[in-house]
Structure formats: structure tokens, C-alpha cells
């Protein structure tokens, strides 16, 4: 069975409808990427905290101050 829709293009879509569809698609992509980024960040944070908990705490000794070089002769 053939209809007009199979042979002819459907009516024009308004600019507002196109913009709304584009906006919805863009926000869908943005929200998906944001949730994936948050999930990845949480996983990496958990791994880092686990690794830091397993490592012994090392005391950091401050380095002595560097000596100033003194030139003799010309100044």
C-alpha cells in the first residue's frame, strides 16, 4: 500500500521544533558525559585512597637552606 508519506517529503518542521530537538540532544550528550566523568573520578579517588592507605607514612625531612655564593675580588 502506498501513501503520500512514502513518495513525498513530510511538511516542514518549524525552526523552534528543530532548535528544541537539537537542544534536547545536546543536553542528553552533555549529561551523559558529565555522569561518566563523575563515575570515573569517584573510581580513581577510591583507588588513590586505597593505595595511600596501604603505603607506610614516610616522614619528610626539610632540606637545609642553600648557601649563598660569595665572590671575592670584583663586586
Image (spheres, rainbow, N blue to C red):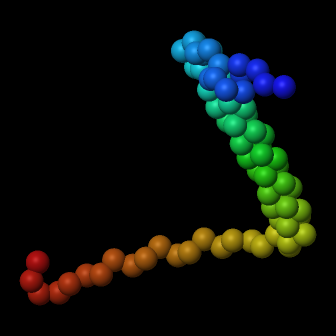
Q: Measured from the top left, where is residue 62 in percent x and y?
A: 60, 71
Q: Who's the residue at 79% across and 52% down the image?
A: 40
Q: Who's the residue at 78% across and 73% down the image?
A: 58
Q: Measured from the top left, where is residue 12 in percent x and y?
A: 58, 15
Question: Residue 52 or 13: which is nearer the viewer?
Answer: 13
- Position of 67 compared to 29: left or right? left
Q: Is residue 27 visible?
A: no
Q: Is residue 41 visible?
A: yes
Q: Who's the residue at 11% across and 87% down the image?
A: 73
Question: Residue 10 or 16: which is nearer the viewer?
Answer: 10
Question: Residue 30 or 40: which is nearer the viewer?
Answer: 30
The correct choice, above or below, for 64 with respect to 9 in the image is: below
- Position of 70 compared to 7: left or right? left
Q: Measured from the top left, where is residue 57 in percent x and y?
A: 82, 69
Q: Residue furthest bottom?
A: 73
**Quarter of the figure that contains the N terminus:** top right
Amino acid at each position: 500500500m502506498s501513501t503520500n508519506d512514502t513518495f513525498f517529503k513530510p511538511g516542514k518542521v518549524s525552526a523552534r521544533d528543530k532548535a528544541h530537538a537539537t537542544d534536547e540532544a545536546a543536553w542528553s550528550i552533555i549529561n551523559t558525559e558529565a555522569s561518566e566523568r563523575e563515575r570515573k573520578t569517584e573510581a580513581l579517588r577510591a583507588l588513590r585512597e586505597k593505595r595511600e592507605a596501604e603505603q607506610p607514612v614516610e616522614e619528610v625531612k626539610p632540606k637545609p637552606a642553600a648557601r649563598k655564593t660569595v665572590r671575592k675580588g670584583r663586586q
